[in-house]
Image (spheres, rainbow, N blue to C red):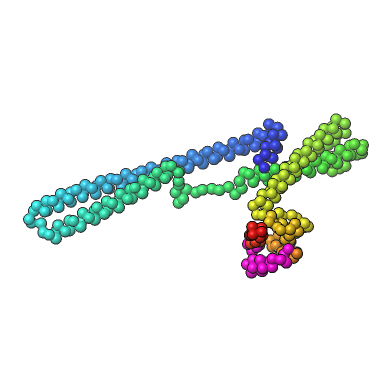
Amino acid sequence: MRAILESYDSELTPSEHSPQLSRRMREAEEMVQKLHAHNTELEGQLSQVLEEVGNHKQRAEMLEVEMKVLKSQECTAEQSTVVTKEEVDTLRLKIEELEAERSKLEEENRSLEMKLEKLTVQGDYDPSRTKVLHLSMNPASLAKQQRKEEQQQLQEECERLRELVRVLEGGGAIPGNLEGVGGFQSPQEVAELKKQVESAELKNQRLKEVFQTKIQEFRKVCYTLTGYQIDITTENQYRLTSIYAEHQGDCLLFKASSSGGKMQLLETEFSRTIRELIELHLLRQDSIPAFLSALTLDLFSRQTIA
């Protein structure tokens, strides 16, 4: 599809390119502004996290000082004969609690540092404070729709030009519905119209060739990946032939409903030989993919054993 778009772009004039380029440039500028705003918010979050880390470090240092003071008091209490045994035990419990709290604060500090590193490296954001906007239609879908509309307009214009050329070559009067297309009858203008018609037909032919090539590639990929060649026999009826089929006529026929949401297996000579798989996967489990997969494994095992 990119090659098709580039082939169309290569035939456009610079004046036709400029609106598209201007629109893309405006979209790029809007995206840059959004990125700048996002970076500013991330920097604010980073400063807040750094401030929290500094507060925790300061608190840890204060606890270390308090613990040293308590340890010095404990040493003084051991030297003093006035301090009772109960007071010593209380001080020891207090020291243990402070050490446990210090370990907890150190763990929180490490967690905050890891979070800070993640914010710095990966550019993460806070979902509660940052809103992410998603486009309802991406630019590729818009471009595809625009190309489809342009192709339809070109086809309509080609039909009008063909009719006008036939009228001008026959020397007849221009019909009322073609008066807006052109009010000229000179041979040079007729030749120019023919060139335009040929150019439009060439574009349509190129599109048909590309689409036909893509369809053939898609069918080959489906045949290689799924193991089934899918052919359309009549309207809403499809024939599936397995890559491991023992005979050329071994095939399955499926018929789609008018809405296209339900598939029905039609009876064939080959389907009569696999009634067990039909009974299990289609009638009981109601799963066509499971049925096709089981049939592929069964046919493959037959060839392997043979």
Residue positioned 17% across, 50% down in the render? 71
Residue positioned 75% across, 42% down in the render? 209
Residue positioned 65% across, 61% down in the render? 298
Q: Nearer the viewer, residue 6 or 266?
A: 266
On the image, which quarter does residue 227 sit in?
bottom right
Specify whether residue 4 is painted magenta.
no
On the image, which quarter does residue 291 sit in?
bottom right
Residue 2, image x, y percentages = 65, 40
Residue 32, image x, y percentages = 52, 38
Q: In the current view of this chain or complex, which residue is farthest to the top?
A: 188
Q: Is residue 201 above or below residue 264?
A: above
- Main SS type for the magenta part? helix
Q: Which residues are magenta?
A: 270-291
Q: Is residue 259 visible?
A: no
Q: Is residue 227 above or below residue 46?
A: below
On the image, which quarter does residue 175 sit in?
top right
Specify whether residue 273 is painted magenta.
yes
Tell me: 135 left or right of 45. right
Q: In the current view of this chain or complex, which residue is farthest to the front?
A: 306
Query: Quarter of the image containing the N terminus?
Result: top right
Residue positioned 85% across, 30% down in the render? 188
Q: Nearer the viewer, residue 36 or 122?
A: 122
